Amino acid sequence: MRRSSLTLMCVLAVIAGTAGTARAQGALSLLGFGYPVGGTSTRGVGSGGSLAGLDPQSPMNPAAIVLGTRLQGYFQFEPEFRSVQAGGPAVNTTTTRFPLFMVSGQQERATFALSFSSFMDRTWSNSYADTQSVGTERIPSTVFTSSVGGIADVRAAMAWTFSEQFHVGAAVHLFPGENRVTLGRIFADSSKAGGFQLDNRYSFTGTAMSFGAVWLTGHHIALGGDVRLGGAIRMRLGDTTLVGSGTIPLRAGLTASYDGLAGTVFTVRVGKERWTDFRGLGSSALGLKDATDVSVGMEVLGPSLGATPMVIRTGYRVRGLPFTYGTTAVREGSFAGGLGIPVGGSRAMLDLGVSRATRTAATITEKAWLMSIGVGIRP
């Protein structure tokens, strides 16, 4: 019996590691290879993601880094409080992320930036009570599964200023990652039946390039366009055994803003991500879905702290998530808001953002509060 159970666990662990069937993860946002965090700063979160292509702290459009200060360091903290309901009582979980770190600087017409951001987050854990037959007895036990890790996006970007109105940029991306998958069973009476635990580590390596442009038209309209061209990404068991290979998803987006009203900026972004490029990285049974991302938002100058005004943000976003639940597409809609609070005059900015997200597929509803705190320091 024990040998059969261990064999079954090995099979299940391989399935979990290759993301063949992810329903047991208990969250729509963590299906497949994980949740696409989005690569947006706290400022971008507060605007519903609509500012991403014109935001120097969001590693989306490499040309946008010229819109920041000459030298800046930025880091971000994001806890998520998630509730999932599938016909029964809601299950609540909390995930803590540090999704973005960036440094940037300028030298004459060239601006440089190095960033580390979260691309896919696959950290979750599940456990449930079960019984196992041992001879003529049924012994209570607890089955547990977990995954820790994800895929990161390390970007080195450079932008060039042709004029005060027109800027272009390019970037090189590396995508390192790791998932530690654990599957096991603990018996209440360990003297009659031992416990099992199987640990696997899956590593990822990938590359990509991105290009972008920013055009400040001079008529209160700013336009930003960006595209990411994916290179190969490979998934290995440990550091050697190749499990699968695919391509970093092609992504393209267009962002526009209008500041014709004093103290107010309206923004809109439309993007497309071709997640089916991941085909071949995991199980052939994994449902993959290309996703469209549409968001609108605004920034308004608020009360002043000293000589520098605060900034108030709000926005709405709707997007598809990369993977399906069975054959059903998973969608996410979110309302967002935020504040930009100057600290020490213009030397630092504290950004606060909050988003209420709803994810749906079939009969499952998942709701989440995403809190975001970003700090930018300008020496």
Image: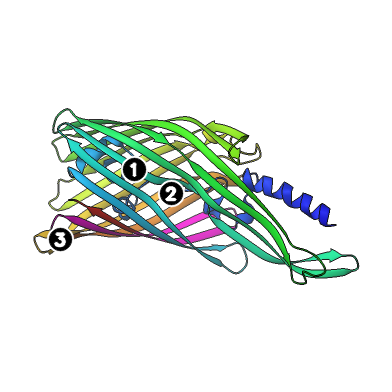
Q: Nearer the viewer, mark 2 or mark 1?
A: 1
Q: Residue furthest right?
A: 136
Label 3: how many residues lie within 10 Å, few (<14), some (14-19) or many (20+)? few
Please name the residue that numbered disc 2 is placed on: 37
203 displayed left or right of 215: right
Q: Which residue is mark 3?
A: 344
Task: Considering the whole magenta stretch, tell me its main secondary structure.
Answer: strand
Label 3 to label 1, Cα distance in Å?
24 Å
Residue range in magenta is 343-372
Residue at 67%, 65% (x, y): give it. 128
Q: Nearer the viewer, residue 266 or 146?
A: 146
Position of 108 with respect to 205 (left or right) is left
Count of marks overlaid on the render: 3
| Nearer to the camera, 178 or 68 | 178
Q: How is the image coloured?
A: rainbow
Q: Nearer the viewer, residue 78 or 379?
A: 379
Q: Secondary structure at mark 1?
A: strand
What is the quadrant of residue 335 in the picture? Answer: bottom left
Q: From where the camera sits, is residue 325 visible?
A: yes
- Label 3, label 2: how many angstroms apart (C-alpha)? 30 Å
- The amino acid type found where label 1 is placed reads Ser
Height in image: 140 above or below 378? below
Q: Can residue 50 be seen in the rendering of this structure? A: no
**Lower position in the chain sequence, tag 3 or tag 2:** 2
- Whether 159 is drawn above or below 189: the answer is above
Magenta residue check for 3: no
Per the image, the residue denoted by label 1 is: 115
Rendered location of residue 249, percent (x, y): 47, 34
Nearer the N terminus, badge 2 or badge 1?
Answer: 2
Name the secondary structure under disc 3: loop
